[in-house]
Amino acid sequence: MASSATFTLFISTSLLLLLLCSLKKGDALEGRQATESRRLQHAHTVKISSLLPASVCTSTKGNIKKASLKVVHRHGPCSQLSKDKANAPTLSEILSHDQSRVNSIQSRIAFNSRKNSLEDSQATLPSKSGSSLGSGNYFVTVGLGSPKKDLSLIFDTGSDLTWTQCEPCVRYCYKQQEPTFDPSKSATYSNITCTSPLCSQLSSATGNSPGCSSTTCLYGIQYGDQSFSVGYFGKEKLTLTSTDVVNDFLFGCGQNNQGLFRGTAGLLGLGRDKLSLVSQTSQKYGKYFSYCLPSMSSSTGHLTFGNSGTSSGVKFTPLLTDSQSPSFYFIDITAISVGGRSLSISKSVFSTAGTIIDSGTVITRLPPAAYSAMRTTFRQLMKNYPMTDALSILDTCYDLSNYTTVTIPKINFFFNGNVNVALDLTGILYAASASQVCLAFAGNSDATDVGIFGNVQQQTLEVVYDVAGGKLGFGPGKCS
């Protein structure tokens, strides 16, 4: 009997141990499943093919409002400017030009913050400063003159003066898509005189003092890569749409122009200076504009002036003003998360130099400490994928050529005002090919360099500039 009882006890104990073991395995499995579920909740799972540039234009259909212009990526298949494939810039060249633009913006802001300092009273403007680089990705088509002549202009929130190339091109005009504007054939063009108070406004809009030829006011603007435009300061009839016309619009009529403008006729300035299009049309549009950038170079977006009804779901953060650099749109980043993990970054890291939002900068630039934290976490969450060579300024790249689908950590930016913006996948990765897909961020070289929220990260977001109201809005998913 004793042996039988012992055997029964042994069997019961073994069954209990087996049950406990299976429960532990079940708990571990549930734990792994829960961890994987959380990981997937904070990740994008996508086909590799969706990350690569398309070769066919798919014009975006959407609720295009009044006073809207179509926005086109200048190097994509929707652009009439990109027919010369042989001379089209490579991704490395685009990123190199982007770095020149960033250097220019940062030099300009750094110079402005120092120029009134007694300790730096002898400071001179760096040779690669002046205004920001005129090599932005996106352009719109507007009409100028009477009769109206259509012109493709890069639109740029980091610049103020609008200018276009003009006949007779006294010194030099680069090749552009449309015929060069000829003011002598317009019934509404006139020059601004040297003695006009308007002429003196060029100093803040261009960073250079105006000149004078006979009685005509001259402007000169130089960009970070030594691109430049010099010419007559005039006023003209500007046609945005058939029902939106701006009379006596002040602009530069370029007679000597060189640089990276590649087929466009010039630049449309959307900064905060008095001479920007935003300020010149303040009575008509209330210093209010918005845009949707194409989510891919093969699609189109829109640039809209005036508040014709902000889309629901747009979240606003305060616009800040730097008294030394009042033309730029400063915003306040408070935190960043990667894959659902909040990065350990002190708020002082972002506030040391501040951050601007810029339509012309391609890749977002972060303070060194912020970028380092982002890169470390992103690489940890991407450890199952093989890394490959850097692409220009992008140092976290992967070879995904052996995969059909991939899982990418989500990235969220948090702004002042409790604004949480989830970036689209197009704002996280920048792909040269399936064998070189990179994290679409870069770090500044110094903690005192201004941060820049670039246009890759703005894709699929409706970005709303309520300049008069002092706020900037993000509408996630409003442009797809």
Image (cartoon, rainbow, N blue to C red):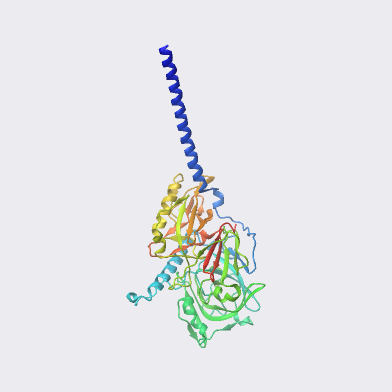
Q: Quadrant of the N terminus?
A: top left
Give the image location of residue 96, x and y in percent.
45, 62
Q: Quadrant of residue 207?
A: bottom left
- Which of these two is toward me, 416 or 195? 416
How many marks are shown on the rendered structure?
0
In the rendered image, the residue lying farthest to the left is 119
Q: Taking the image as drawn, is residue 34 in sight?
A: yes
Give the percent coordinates (x, y) of residue 131.
46, 72
- Going by the image, does 269 lie left or right of 377? right
Residue 256 higher or lower than 44, as above or below: below
Q: Position of residue 138 (x, y in %)?
A: 55, 65
Q: Name the residue: 66% across, 78% down.
A: 147
Q: Is residue 281 visible?
A: no
Residue ranking furthest to the top: 1
Quarter the C terminus occupies: bottom right
Judging depth in this view, the residue of 132 and 5 nearest the camera is 5
Q: Is residue 429 left or right of residue 299?
A: left
The residue lying at 57 percent from left, 70 percent from top is 288
Q: Residue 306, position in %: x, y?
A: 60, 70
267 is higher (above) or lower (below) than 52: below
Q: Nearer the viewer, residue 148 or 65?
A: 65
